[in-house]
Amino acid sequence: MPKNKIKVDNKQLIAFEKKLRKFHDDGIDDFIKQAIRAVAAQFLEKVIRLTPVGDYDGNVSFRTNPAESTKEVSFTTRDGQSVFFVANNPPRDVSFSARTAGKQGGTLRRGWNLRNFKKVDGGYEVEIYNDVHYAPFVENGHMIRNTAGGQAKGWVKGRFMLRNTEIELTFILPEILEQQLSLYLSKHFKG
């Protein structure tokens, strides 16, 4: 019985094996860094989008109780000084425009950033932070206190930008990682 011989050129197979070894030796770490940076960038983009922006229309108005003969008025100026006065026989409806008309906020949004990308036991870590002093109050909510420092008058609900971003990201994380792996493999295994 005749034997058929098949000739195989294994140069491409050897080249692929070398690429695979290189990927295994130092490529996995590079891929993980790239993927974590992509996830952190997505997180940052989403938390910025969910962060509210103050809108200062400059109009102030309130209604007084006609049964009261005086009305206490207090506020804090832009310089941080407290102003307090008592208006005798105040009008029923009060409204005025402040100098903040047309001012647009955004300080809290601009406060988001990334730092401290580092390798730690069991993986990598990146810190997403906002160092605007009132960020925790917007995130978690806060009490409304009487200007004299007395009893709480109410509660402002939190906006939960961080928490909601984290929840949203858990649903799309597999998609982000799959996309990053595809990009990385096509970059290192082409040809």
Image (cartoon, rainbow, N blue to C red):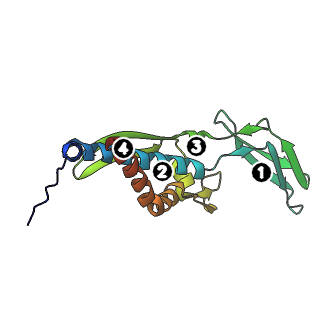
Q: Quadrant of the N terminus?
A: bottom left
User: Which label number is shown at residue 72?
Assistant: 1
Residue 35 in view: yes
Amino acid at circle 3: Arg
Label whose residue precedes the other's in the sequence (1 or 2): 2
Q: Secondary structure at mark 2?
A: helix
Would you name the residue on which mark 4 appears?
34
Mark 1 surroundings within 10 Å by alpha-carbon count, few (fewer than 14), some (14 through 19), many (20 or more): few
What residue is rendered at 43% in x and 41% in y? Answer: 114
The three-letter code of the residue at mark 4 reads Gln
Q: Looking at the image, is mark 3 or mark 1 earlier in the sequence? A: 1
* Secondary structure beneath label 4: helix
Q: Can you tell which of label 4 and label 2 is closer to the viewer?
A: 4
Residue 65, image quadrant: bottom right
**Residue that mark 3 sits on:** 109
Specify whether residue 90 is in view: no
- Contact between marks 4 and 2 (CB within 8 A): the answer is no
* Earlier sequence position, callout 4 versus callout 1: 4
User: Tag 3's secondary structure?
Assistant: helix
**Mark 4 in CB contact with mark 3 (< 8 angstroms):** no
The residue beneath circle 2 is: 43
Are the residues at dot 2 and dot 3 in contact (C-beta closer than 8 Å)? no
Q: At which x and y percent is residue 154?
A: 64, 63
Residue lying farthest to the left in this orientation: 1
Q: Nearer the viewer, mark 3 or mark 1?
A: 3
The Cα atoms of the two marked residues, 1 and 2, are separated by 45 Å
Image location (x, y in percent) of residue 9: 19, 46
